Image (cartoon, grey):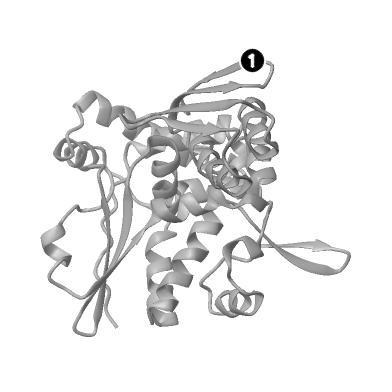
């Protein structure tokens, strides 16, 4: 079975990876249980035996427990989606081979690097800076903690582009005869070919990674992990607690984009408040808001301004 090359452009994301490694190393810790994914232990171990997932277990009194981080969660959901659509183990193995390639294993030539960046719209100065950063990361590669290596893979870049740059990313799997073609479709010129005409006429599956990440943030059982990973800070956690416990008058959320404000009222039913709390958790985790105002019953106000990830 042949496989077309997966086009993912990686230059500027190196800067992002460096920032994540220095400021947000907790993201890489594996804390979430397998049950959050909806994947059975039987399927997980079957996929692991075929090399579709990396070995992610922790020993607890001689019993192995699967533990995941955000990168693992999204990847398992991708495998689950592909299996539900009938993709074979071999097809998924080929995709994993493409996506989990470490960019620090790639040979880079300064002139070709700058020319490629120029075609993507980067200035010569920006391209040279990216090139120097890649060279630096190659030199210090041995000092990168093993758990952070995922950030230097194509897969890590895709997830990080959603988490930190709010990009839209779809993984495309198209079938052409007996061959499978893989691509990434994104609103960023740095990721994927963006060649709709290349895959749209073919039978294909488009997996929206943003939707999977939304699920990751909206699972109530994952909230404690989100706080540990510092996706959610103590002030945001205070708002969520007030909403769930009904200890407030009103919460007013101003979205990042020009959308209608979200109003949460004490008169909402418990079910409605919990649903809105899930929505809030996603907004908080992705820092996808401009301002949140929490008004307690005693008229005390808590105001949170959006903080940039980077």
Q: Name the residue under label 1.
A: 299
Q: Can residue 93 be seen in this view?
A: yes
- Residue 23 falls left or right of residue 120: right
Horizontal and vertical percent position of residue 296: 65, 21
Q: Position of residue 107 (x, y in %)?
A: 34, 50
Residue drawn at (63%, 50%) of the image: 220
Q: Position of residue 260 (x, y in %)?
A: 35, 31
The one of 104 and 240 positioned closer to us in this rendering: 240
Task: Give me the residue at 64% from left, 25% from top.
Answer: 235
In this view of the protein, which residue sits in the foreground, 280 or 89?
280
Q: In which quarter of the image is residue 208?
A: bottom left
Numbered disc 1: secondary structure: loop
Residue 136 shown left or right of residue 113 in the figure? right
Residue 62 percent location from the top left of the image: 86, 69
Q: Is residue 172 above or below residue 91?
A: above
**Can I make out residue 135 in this image?**
no
Residue with the most extreme front position: 267
Vertical position of residue 301 compared to residue 230: above or below: above
Quarter of the rendering occupied by the N terminus: bottom left
Q: Is residue 246 left or right of residue 93?
A: right
Q: Which residue lies furthest to the right in this view?
A: 61
Q: In which quarter of the image is residue 185?
A: bottom left
Q: How many labels does the image show?
A: 1
Quadrant containing the C terminus in the rendered view? top left
């Amino acid at each position: 079975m042949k496989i077309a090359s997966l086009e993912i452009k990686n230059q500027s994301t190196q800067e992002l990876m460096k920032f994540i490694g220095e400021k947000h190393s907790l993201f890489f810790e594996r804390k979430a249980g397998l049950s959050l994914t909806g994947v059975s232990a039987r399927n997980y171990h079957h996929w692991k035996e075929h090399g579709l997932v990396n070995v992610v277990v922790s020993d607890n009194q001689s019993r192995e427990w699967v533990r995941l981080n955000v990168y693992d969660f999204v990847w398992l959901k991708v495998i689950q989606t592909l299996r539900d659509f009938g993709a074979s183990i071999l097809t998924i193995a080929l995709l994993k081979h493409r996506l989990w390639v470490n960019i620090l294993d790639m040979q880079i030539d300064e002139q070709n690097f700058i020319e490629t960046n120029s075609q993507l719209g980067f200035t010569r100065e920006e391209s040279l800076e990216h090139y120097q950063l890649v060279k630096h990361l190659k030199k210090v590669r041995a000092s990168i903690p093993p758990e952070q290596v995922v950030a230097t893979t194509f897969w890590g870049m895709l997830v990080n582009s959603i988490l930190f740059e709010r990009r839209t990313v779809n993984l495309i799997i198209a079938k052409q005869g007996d061959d499978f073609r893989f691509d990434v479709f994104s609103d960023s010129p740095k990721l994927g070919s963006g060649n709709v005409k290349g895959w749209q006429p073919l039978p294909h599956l488009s997996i929206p990674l943003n939707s999977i990440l939304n699920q990751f943030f909206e699972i109530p059982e994952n909230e404690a992990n989100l706080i540990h990973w510092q996706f959610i800070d103590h002030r945001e956690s205070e708002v969520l607690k007030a909403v769930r416990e009904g200890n407030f008058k009103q919460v007013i959320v101003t979205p990042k984009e020009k959308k209608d404000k979200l109003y949460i009222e004490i008169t909402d039913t418990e079910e409605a408040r919990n649903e809105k709390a899930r929505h809030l958790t996603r907004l908080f985790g992705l820092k996808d808001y401009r301002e949140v105002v929490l008004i307690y019953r005693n008229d005390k106000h808590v105001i949170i301004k959006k903080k940039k990830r980077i």
